[in-house]
Image (cartoon, rainbow, N blue to C red):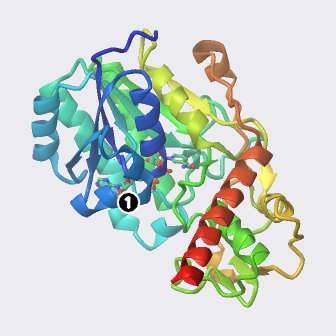
Amino acid sequence: MDSAKNKTALITGITGQDGSYLAEFLLGKSYRVVGLCRHRSAMKVKNLNHLVDKVEVVECDLSNSSLMMDLIRRYQPDEIYNLASQSFPGESWHKAIETGEITGLGAHRLFEAVRQTKPDCRVFQASSSEIFGAAGERSQNERTQYKPVNPYGAAKLYAHSIARMYAESLDMFIARGILFNHESPRRGIHFLTQKVAYGAACISLGIKNSLTLNEQGEPIVADGKISLGNLDARRDWGFAGDYVEAMWLMLQQDKPDEFVIGTGQSHTVREFCSTAFGSVGLTTKDHLRVDQRFLRPAEASPMIADASKAKDILGWTPKTSFTAMVEMMVNYHVLTLRDEMSGKLKR
Ligand code: NAP
């Protein structure tokens, strides 16, 4: 399984959290890595800074079918990882059409481009636990019913269904990873976990009003507090660096299949906050504010992955604990903020 020399992988969403971890992982296996990003200026984003000399980055929006076909013809990839997406479930209520267009139809355009240009190429589709939504079961596996509760979940379910249909009816190799939440210091700043990690770091350094803004355009830390939605929401949070290995493993199997990927442990938002604040010697008391604007119109059931199929068939299990992952995120912000503060003092 390790003899991947000379293989070419194409990654959509290379500038995102998973794109950068996956690129590192595949470079470590001697792949030629070609990344697709939607804006050329995005090549400067921080997740990719350390990789710009190692990966080839080309511009391609998932709305552009003909360009996707041109790139597949040009690079002749052995594997394609479709990570590009409007990936923010909460935000998908405000960007409902764009979410359907890119997260749903964009994936379909890619599968169709592969079918027309290189049907033997192996494809990974990043599905999401959000397709389960309000399924209401204690834990979720590949047999759980789909009941998305937001436009993001619905768009992911469309892409997931088309991917399975193309694999089963057209004999294409499209594997589906039903990914539960996974986080890292490279997570987008508007995601809850990243706001909490950044907020805890700011407050521990005495920053009462942060420069970085939330999705409402307000400081993430205001008057020494961070504003969040439902503190009792329960999620299964893993480390992104572990999840990209599962993506690769799915494309090394004999047949395309679908796998739930998660840790099997769940925590509430409140517990995430306590762990983050605890890692810098603080408690959450006086630092959290519940803000109705961050509540979702419909809340998903508690999410807990039953990833036993991935363990049995792929031999995959997560390596990083919840606490280690949260500490990694807070520590990243503490170091970055300290650098910024000392840079300012020197100037
Ligand atoms: P992410 O950090 O938000 O990255 C998404 C990527 O998609 C970014 O590179 C973004 O480009 C790109 N993109 C957005 N719109 C595009 C368009 N119109 N055309 C081309 N590219 C576009 O997401 P992630 O956390 O790495 O997640 C990777 C994949 O896994 C996504 O499909 C996500 O929905 C799915 N997933 C993630 C999780 C999770 O917890 N992280 C869980 C389940 C499923 P810009 O840099 O230009 O914005």
Residue 138 lies, with reference to residue 327, above or below; the image says above
Mark 1 residue crowding within 10 angstroms, few (<14) / some (14–19) / many (20+):
few
Residue reaching furthest front? 346
> Which residue occupies 63% across, 16% down?
315
Residue reaching furthest bottom? 223
Residue 175 drawn at (x, y percent): 42, 26
Amino acid on which the number 1 mark rests in the picture: Val
Q: Nearer the viewer, residue 91 or 67?
A: 67
Residue 124 drawn at (x, y percent): 39, 31
Residue 94 lies, with reference to residue 322, above or below; the image says below
Residue 275 drawn at (x, y percent): 83, 58
Residue 63 drawn at (x, y percent): 21, 54
Could one spot residue 229 in this view of the protein?
no
Q: How many marks?
A: 1
Residue 193 lies, with reference to residue 23, above or below; the image says below
Image quadrant assignment for residue 282: bottom right
Pointer 1 residue = 45
- Taking the image as shown, residue 16 lies to the left or right of residue 342, namely left
Q: Nearer the viewer, residue 161 or 72?
A: 72
Could one spot residue 164 in this view of the protein?
yes
> Which residue occupies 60% across, 32% down?
260
- SS at mark 1 in the image: loop
> Which residue occupies 76% across, 61% down?
269
Image quadrant assignment for residue 174: top left
Residue 186 lies, with reference to residue 258, above or below; the image says below
For ligand 1, tell me if the residue under mark 1 lies within 8 Å: yes
- Taking the image as shown, residue 174 lies to the left or right of residue 74, namely right
- Taking the image as shown, residue 324 lies to the left or right of residue 34, namely right
Q: Nearer the viewer, residue 229 or 42?
A: 42
